[in-house]
Each structure stands twice: as structure tokens, then as C-alpha cells.
Image: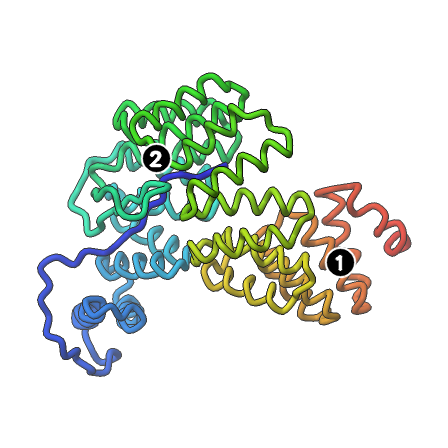
Amino acid sequence: MNKIGHLIFFILFAGICYAQNINKSDPAKNSPAKNLQLAKNYLENNNEEKALLYLNICLSQRYDLEEALFLRARIYNNKNQLTKALSDYNGLIDLNANNKEYYFNRAFLRYKLEQYELAVEDFYISLKLPGSSTQTAFFKIEQGSEGITRISTIHGMESDTWNYIGLCHQALGNTGEAVASYTKGIEIDPESPDLYINRALSYEKVGNIKLALNDYEYVLSLFPDHPIARYNLLNLKTNRKPENQLNLLDDFVEKNPTVAQGYVSRGLFFFDSGNYKYALIDFLKAVELDSNNTDFLFNLALTYEKLNKLNIAEQYFDEVIELDENHAGAHFNLGNIQYKKGAFQEAVSFFTLAHRLDNNNPYILYNRAITQYNLGMIEEACRDIELVRKLDEELGRKFFEKNCGDN
């Protein structure tokens, strides 16, 4: 499902006019207040690494210093270290359980970490709490636009909160609740394309094509050049036979040469058809247009792996992990590459990392079991297969019967 309406957070430091020369005193000898001030100095100079050093020392001196904890959480978020940011927001909410912004930011982090039920709980709490002063500006980038289209604060985020509640429900398979959430957001902001498109996608999910068409057409009445609404509308109106689907994708790419999603969609079509050389061309173009999109990089890496260009695939999977250290799929596929290279011990390490991040995926455990078996680790392999059989009986059955039946 397309996930529309991403937010980028920037920290605002109002009223700070520090000198350019930053004090280089020993942070361990400073007071917590001084270390906090020095951290702000470094942030003013766009040096997050140094700021993080002073904030860590400051918080080791005073763990309950709310401003320092907030700034560190924002840095972790900017660096995409989501679990660390989440831990700091847990601490902030323990210190101040009535802060609307803390709940919204923690909900957004939980959404990104796919902790959808917990995210919904936090989004609802943020809606109920009264607004307060905020240190964060929310720069909203509409899908298909080339820049920032709206600047808001936590006070104006109610419609976006309902949008994310809807996305969480949709991810959980609660399509009715998702539609209701998008509708509440539309009542607040009746001209938000995100809400209409996401509601249309939910309608598609349950086969209510007429209502989906209505929402896409309404978005185009407001924004005639909106590429996602136009693509989805054409997709619904076209007979979805493979030859028609490819013609539609070609037409969309031709009319929207700077929209990465068009190349991704066509690349996925080629990938699913086994035409990896053509898929590679489209995924390369998508990454050229958006080099920090982990989904695009992951698709590109998978395609290189399919073409047996393992070293290049490995480089792109590494790039995915640099952007998202919690990407289980990248760790899993790096394990597969190491296995193909005969580096079984390294493969086990990657499969173990992937399993920690996604412990309900039987294929990760199955591949680790096979790798362990090749290393002579029979007991460990059979233990993994027992877990595989609990998740997918058929997947692990043959291996167990052949190699573990007497264990």
C-alpha cells in the first residue's frame, strides 16, 4: 500500500545567539547546564555528533534533564536511530506525561518501527491532550511534489494524526477503522490529498471501487497534476491484463519522468515477470531520483542479487542498513549472499541479526538452519527447524524428517 504524507522534523532553537567559537572545555568537568549549552552551540553549527557527545555526558550527570533528553531524541530521529529515539521519548513521557508533542513524536516513531497498535494508542492520547509550546516544526511534503508545501506545528497536526491512525489500522488489516480515521481527518482538512488517496486505497482493499474512484477524482479536481491520484485512477479504469498494465506504466513514466514511483512500479512489474535486466534499469532511475529511499535501494539490491552480481548487491544492502539499521530484509539478504559465497559463519551472523529484528519470519530461521547444518552445527540447526515448524509446518517438515528425526 502507498503510504502517503511523510513528515520531516527539524529542531528550532529560538532566541539562541551564541558566539562562533565553541568552548572546548573538558565536558566531564562541566556542570550539566554548561554541557547542555555547549550541545546547543554545536547544534547551531550543525554538528550533531559533537552535540550528542555533550548531551550524553549531560544526561549521565542528570538523567532527568528534560530539555537535554528532548534534544537527544531529536538527534537520534534525524540520524534514523529510531530505537534510541524511542527510548528517549519513553523517558520524556515518564518525566512529563501531559506533553502532546512527546506522544505524537513517540507515536510517529512507533509507526515507523511498525509497532502499529502502540502507535495508535499514542496518537489517540496526543489528540486528547491540550496543545503546548513546541520546539519542533513539522515540514509536510506532499507526495508527488518537489518541495515543502506546508509548515505546521503540533497544534495543526490533527488531520495528519488521523491520517497516521488510518495507516496504522490499514497495516493491521482493520480496513473499516482505517476508512473511519481518514474520514475524520477529511472533516478537519477537506483539501488534504493524502487523506483521500489513503482512503481510496482502503476502499480498493475491500473492493469498493466506486468510492475509490470518487476519492481519486476529487483529488484531481483539486490538484490536476497529482501523479499518484492520476496513476491509481488510470490503474482502476484499465483492464489489468499484463499487456495493458505495462502500457499504463509506460504511459505514466513518459508523462511523469521525474516521479520515482513510476519507475519503481514498472520495475516491480519487470521483476515479477523475471525480466531482471529491465527491472534494473528502472530501479537505477528511481534511486537516481531518490537516493535515500530504503525501499528503492532494497529493490535495486535484490535485482543485482537476482542477476548474480553479488558484490554490487552487497553494497546496496549495506546502504539500506546505513539508512535503517533495523531493516531485517537487508540483513537477511546479506546472509543469503554470504551463503552463496560459502562464507557460512558470516551468513549465520547476518541471519541472527535478521531474526532479532523479525522473529516471526520462518524463512530467516530456515536459512540459518541450513547454514548451521553446513557448518556441522546439527543441534543448533535442528533447534531452529523446530521453531520453523511452529511458524510454518510444511516449510520445515522435510528438513526435520531427513536430518533431525532421531535427535
Residue at x 36% of width, y 35% of height? 226
Q: Which mark is residue 369?
A: 1
For numbered disc 1, what is the local secondary structure? Answer: helix
Q: Quadrant of residue 184?
A: top left
Label 2: how many Cα within 10 Å (few below 14, some 14–19, many 20+): some
Residue 93 position in % (x across, y down): 30, 48
Q: Is residue 7 above or below residue 346?
A: above
Quarter of the image with the C terminus in it: bottom right
Q: Report the Cα–Cα distance between label 1 and label 2.
A: 51 Å
Residue bearing mark 2: 225
Label 1: how many Cα within 10 Å (few below 14, some 14–19, many 20+): many
Foreground: disc 1 or disc 2: 2
The residue under label 2 is which amino acid type? Answer: Asp
The residue under label 1 is which amino acid type? Answer: Ala
Residue at x 24% of width, y 78% of height? 27
Residue 279 position in % (x across, y down): 60, 51
Q: How is the image coloured?
A: rainbow
